Amino acid sequence: MGEQFGWAGTILFIDLSNGRITRVPTTEYRPEEFMGGVGLNTKIFWELECPEVKAFHPNNPIIISAGPLTGTYGPFGRGLISTISPQCYPLELFAYSSFGGRFASELKFAGYDTIVILGRSEKPVYLSIQDEEVRIKRADKVWGMDTFLAQQTLLADEVDASILVIGPAGENLSRIAIILNETNFAAGQGGFGAVMGSKNLKAIAVKGTSSVKVARPYESLPLIKMMIEENKKVEDWVGRFRGPYTTPKETQEIFARNYYVKQIGCYGCPRQCVSIHHIPEIGLSGAKCGDWQWAPMFCSAPKDIWEANVLMQKLGLNSFDITCGIPVLLYRAHKAGVLSTKEIEEDIGFPAPQWLGGQATDHQFLSVFFHKVANGEIPYSQGTPRFTDYFKERLSNGKGLMNLQKELYTARGYAYHHMEDLGSALHWATDTRNPIGSSHEYRYPFRDPSPEVMEHFGFPPYSSYQIRDLTKTSYEKVEIVTKWVQEHQCLKNSLTLCEFWTDLSNFYHPPEMDIRIFESSIFSAITGINMNPEQLAHTGERIWNLRRAVMVRRENRTREDDTLNEPYFEKSITCPGGVSRGLQNGPIDRVKFERLKDKYYELRGWDVKTGRPTRGKLEELGLKEVANKLTSLGKLP
Amino acid sequence: MEDTRSGAIVYQQGLCSACGVCEVMCSLWHEGMVGPAFARSNILRDPFTAKHRHITCPQCDDPACYFVCPSKDKALCIDKATGVIYINEGACNGCGLCVDACPFDPSRIKLHAVKKVAFKCDLCMGRKEGPLCVEHCPFQALILPKDK
């Protein structure tokens, strides 16, 4: 066997129903065409026949992949989890979520690119992986524990392992349960923690003593060095996530002065973008970006903010959904007169804080609310859309509430994140999950007016402010941006490359630091496989098309499903936090949006009528067997 | 007279993020592959207190590993000018006595799983920029003080 660079070389299949453990060479899944991460995950899911089961069915596989670059020096530490998502609404779609930390690198050091978990254990178990030694062990003593305590307890047996774990929320099948590594690295979107819970799988502990081989380190090291140097020259926008940046200055100062400990981040990455804070009576945890943004939406005291953050991580809850979801819905419903304080307290069962017209402290509200979600109490634990559905008949003005829900939620049931421009709207319409959470390219390259960046990448040179103001923007050529971002997102999520470090406005010059050239040179240096930027772009397109093929095969995705929630076509909708974000001067023009979809399908080489990939396109991408399968199912246009 | 003693790497725990760049660079430079098991400089992590530990050879003045080596001065050697304790792989038979003799826990000398020889930090001897881990640490948590 020749020396393999980049990839570890083995995929691990574990069936929890019968305890069978199988090892398959990664080469059987054509890693040069699908890389790792979401690409490899989707390829494996396709080969598993895209099971048409519900998220909590034993046949729903959990697929966890590192990428060919993971474990080496640079921002490549992410892992990607793919599975059928219980959070997607109304249909449970095959989706993915990524996580940082050390786990994905440790997986490579143990000799694996991917773990595929199938079946369901009778009793609570955890996976112990130490190099070749793979065991399914009893997890009785950690079942019921919060995510921190469970990891600390397991570490006594699994010395120096890196652990993916679920909290009570995952055990109790909350549809917004996360899978966590350490104190803060979470696969947060999709409710994947509940899929682990449904398999009675509490944790996966990995420790490896092998290595990742780098083909040409003398080429890769200067690139990373240059990346670091170039990064020093631009605004450190990740730096502001060191504290609760949306709160008043005094609050930020309290955190900086009294609670800040140090930075952490992914393995092997020099950026270390997560900050650790510690309040002795509450706990120590990492936090970044959204962690700082969501909790202050309904807490103001520093200790409450921190308690909310730590509690979400410990219980294993998706902080994005639990704060941008039900509380915002309640707040807006209350403000709009749809829900009275009495109804909130008596019918819905929360102690109403001041912002809902009640007397409860923020602490009382958040601890009752979070625990109800984590304990699996229906309907709280089911995420906001299902929570709303549950109450729609009972509430005095259910229709109004339903409309609010649709403003806050996208077509797939994910809480509102930025929808900055028409390109991201199109992206949102055609993806399976919250695409902005996975593709910050839509947020950051266009944050400040920078026609230069747009032009560099061949996009229409509108500035961001024009793009998000619907009276100033154009529907022309938007499909070009969406297509590029989607494919680049697939590539980054497969290599794997950091989402935060690669915002385009800081990554287009000098020539070596054009993100496309950088990806090509770093991939070639690490794996020893020379791929030029065009070939890598082709890979991204292949992965996006395979993802679409899964949607078509498993979920009967058609053009009609590629849409936004109705209110986006009816009025101007801005971010629930009241921040001046989101599309301005809406609504989106329905006719023009449909025309934009025509152009998008055309550009993709897909059938405009059905929105499905054509045989020609699939064969061009080396996906002939995918086309054949879709034909045999009568699903190829 | 110029002081040529090497000194030893100093670890500032309060700054260390446990990113592992020291391990990555060390194993890549010395072994041509990346893996903490092949690094001479390791981090023992505690993500729940954020108080990590740095595990590497402090270049003892009275090195038990040296005295126990059956091929001392051929396999386990001390650099005359700097006092750096280093292993000459070609002369090491992997007996492991030095690993056990190290007074620290875990031992600062490891056995190489592939080459079956002992290996340890030699402060990147011969590298004019000094130790790689010190050079690449993103937070200057590892330093090699010049004044001793």
Image: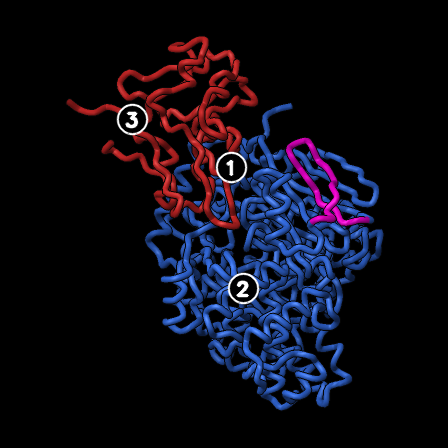
Q: Which residues are magenta?
A: A123-141
Q: Which mark is residue A524?
A: 1
- Colour scheme employed for the rendering of this structure: by chain
Q: Chain of mark 3?
A: B
Q: Is residue A5 above or below residue A156?
A: above
Colour in which the image shows chain B: red
Q: Is residue B82 above or below residue A31?
A: above
Q: Chain of mark 2?
A: A
Type of residue at label 2? Asn
Q: Are marks 3 and 1 on the same chain?
A: no
Residue at horizontal 26%, vertical 18%?
A: B81
| Residue that carries the numbered disc 2 in the rendered image | A309
Colour in which the image shows chain A: blue
Q: Residues within 10 Å of mark 1 (few under 14, many from 20)?
A: many
Asked whether the viewer can see residue A294, the reply is yes
Type of residue at label 1? Ser
Q: Is residue A623 magenta?
A: no
